[in-house]
Amino acid sequence: MDIRSLKSKFIQSRDYSTDDVNTLMDFAKKAYIHNEINFKEYRLLVRELEAQGAVFPDDYKEDSLIENS
């Protein structure tokens, strides 16, 4: 899956369009959690979205069980 496919899937699901890379990253994460995309697709999408400026929220890092254990 590429960014265009992700945007298309987003539009079908939400009934509106967005170019916000952080919103698309959240949507990709949800798709991965619900097994709609596999890990390889998710990883590639995250790389592409990060290259376009997407970032994980700071509170996500603060709540991380891995980094805070």
Image: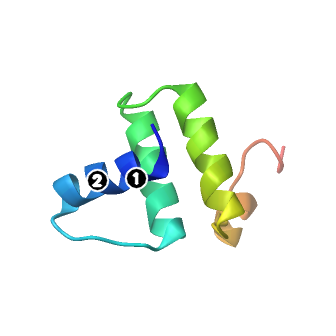
Residue at the spot of label 2: 8
Mark 2 closeness class: few <14, some 14–19, many ≥20 residues within 10 Å: some
Q: Is residue 33 above or below residue 59?
A: above
Q: Amino acid at mark 1?
A: Arg
What count of labels does the image hold? 2
Image: 41 above or below 64:
above
* Residue depicted at 45% across the width and 67% down the height: 23
- Image coordinates of residue 32 in percent, x first then y, are 45, 36
- State the image coordinates of residue 56 (x, y, percent, origin top left): 65, 63
Left or right of 26, for residue 40: right
Left or right of 24 in this view: 12: left
- From the viewer's perspective, is residue 20 above or below residue 5? below
Towards the viewer: 41 or 36? 41
Name the residue located 45 percent from the left edge and 60 percent from the top edge: 24
Is there a contact, CB below 8 Å, between mark 1 and mark 2? yes
Amino acid tagged 2: Ser
Q: Residue at x 47, y 51 (%)?
A: 3
Residue that label 1 marks: 4
Q: How is the image coloured?
A: rainbow
